[in-house]
Amino acid sequence: MRRKIFLTGGSGYIGTHTCVEILAEGYDIVIYDNLSNSTKKALNKVEKIANKKITFIEGDIRDEKKLYRAMLGCDAVIHFAGLKAVGESVAKPLEYYDNNVSGTISLLKSMKKAKIKTIVFSSSATVYGNPEYLPIDERHPLRTMNPYGTTKLMIENILQDIYKSDSSWKIIILRYFNPVGAHKTGLIGENPNGIPNNLMPLIAQTALGKREYLQIFGQNWETNDGTGVRDYIHVVDLALAHLKALSFLKKPCFEVINIGTGKGHSVLEIIKAFEKNSGRKIPYKFMPRRSGDIAECYADVSKAKQLLNWEAVYSLDDMCKSTWKWQNMNPNGYI
């Protein structure tokens, strides 16, 4: 019998790319999303790429009754749903705790009722805060710097407590570093509402002429060229990590795994690579550092390789090339 996977927030950026890979592997899927930060049009594109129909249910993860009915017949959950803008979380902490933490509690209650005990959770490298050492492994101390990161850490703790109380659960927490890029078809990609929070969409919009210049926050960080360094991972590599996690979850476990490339790239390196792959000049201006920013952050990914037999295969050029293709084909996102 084919496995059926329940994806919360499955119409978002990482969710849609994961759907494509899961469908290609022969799984059935049910997507549950309130479309607060995404659009159903993205799922039409997924259906086009996969050449398969998708079961979609519009609903909020805080709605336990609807959740329970929607997940019946599924045997595993991938939990993407959540508010995810760091700056917004500082301005609206209650909304973040309500949606992310309360929503996850509703999800887990519904799973328990539906007798589903397998979950892959989307966490984040923000749980590490300002790194004490690099590369960051999974044993690194956890200390968040904003409400968004705190909600991720709270959910990790809840999942750990569930496993301690009932060791028949199968739980993998994936701590993402910086997802970028788009599907090779150019049909799906990162589609931020309003002003993007992330570097790559800002660069792409600047290359397209939608922005006069790119703002770079800080030019005197203790890095090779003075700009911030992050671990950027192609979204398709990240999607494939979820597939590996599902395959791994055959027996009860609780595992926390970093998902990145293990390499850091500076803002200026990303700009240079994007210019090379788009043929466009990216004008930029240096701005003062933002409070809460850090100099460098990149992952130790040896656990992912050892446990999941997974490692990133897409290069920085691939990330830039696919982003540019998506942005060029969809200058105004999904319309």
Image (cartoon, helix red, strand yellow):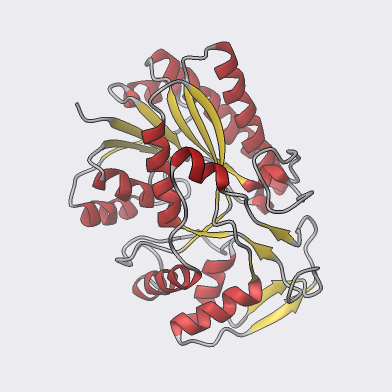
Residue 231 drawn at (x, y percent): 60, 59
- Answer whether residue 209 is visible to the viewer in this image: no
- In this rendering, would 324 be left or right of 134? left
- Which residue is at 45% across, 64% downward? 181
- Which residue is at 33% across, 24% downward? 75
Task: Tell me the quarter of the image containing the N terminus.
Answer: top left
Q: Indicate the quadrant where residue 294 lies.
A: bottom right
Task: Tell me the quarter of the image containing the C terminus.
Answer: bottom left
Toward the front, the furthest residue is: 306
Q: Nearer the viewer, residue 139 or 57?
A: 139
Residue 165 drawn at (x, y percent): 58, 12
Residue 81 drawn at (x, y percent): 48, 39
- In this rendering, would 17 be left or right of 157? left
- Which residue is at 70% across, 41% downward? 147
Residue 29 drawn at (x, y percent): 28, 37
Q: Is residue 276 above or below residue 103?
A: below
Q: Nearer the viewer, residue 332 or 250?
A: 250
Q: Is residue 58 above or below residue 236?
A: above
